[in-house]
Amino acid sequence: MSTAEYRWTVPVDHPAFAGHFPGQPIVPGVVLLDQAILFAEQWLGQSAIAWQIGNAKFLSPVGPGETLLFALQRKASGGIGFTVQAAERAVASGSLTPPAA
């Protein structure tokens, strides 16, 4: 199985912070999922827009300016497993499932 790693620093002015949550900004889970999909597209060299979220767990909140490590792993099934970490802290994990042939 092949793997890939990507780093992403959460922009302090990310538009999601405006409503999530004023005074105590937290990155919404959907932003982490979107970033995982974007990295999967880069890694695979193809669009992953029709892929589905197989599962996702959000383990720790993420704030503005944090640097995250996204680790992707190709599964035997053709899907992609991912983990997200901020330093040594686990942030999220899950899997992406390709569209049925």
Image (cartoon, rainbow, N blue to C red):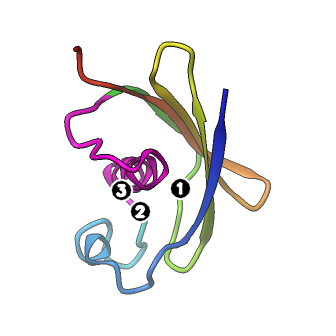
Residue 53 location in percent, x, y?
Answer: 33, 30
Residue toward you, 14 or 72: 72
Dots 2, 3 in contact, CB < 8 A: yes
Q: Which residues are magenta?
A: 27-52
The residue under the point 49% across, 77% down is 64
Outermost residue on the front side: it is 45
Q: Which mark is residue 27?
A: 2
Vertical arrangement, residue 36 with respect to residue 68, above or below: above
Residue 28's disc is 3
Magenta stretch, overall SS: helix
Task: Say which amino acid is labelled 3.
Answer: Pro
The residue under label 1 is which amino acid type? Pro
Circles 1 and 3: CB distance less than 8 Å?
Answer: no
Q: Is there CB contact under 8 Å for labels 1 and 2?
A: yes
x then y, percent, for residue 96: 40, 30
Where residue 101 sits in the image (x, y, percent)? Answer: 22, 14
Q: Is residue 35 left or right of residue 64?
A: left
The correct choice, above or below, for 99 with respect to 51 in the image is above
Q: Secondary structure at mark 2?
A: loop
For residue 61, the mark is 1
Label 3 crowd bin: few (<14), some (14–19), many (20+), radius 10 Å: some
Nearer-N-terminus badge (1/2): 2
Q: Is residue 4 above or below residue 69?
A: above
Please identify the quarter of the rendering in which residue 28 is found. Answer: bottom left
Q: CA distance from mark 1 to mark 3?
A: 9 Å
Q: Earlier in the sequence, mark 1 or mark 3?
A: 3
The local secondary structure at tag 1 comes to: loop
In this view, the residue in front, 2 or 97, is 2
| Cα–Cα span, label 1 and label 2 | 7 Å
Task: Identify the amino acid type marked 2.
Answer: Val
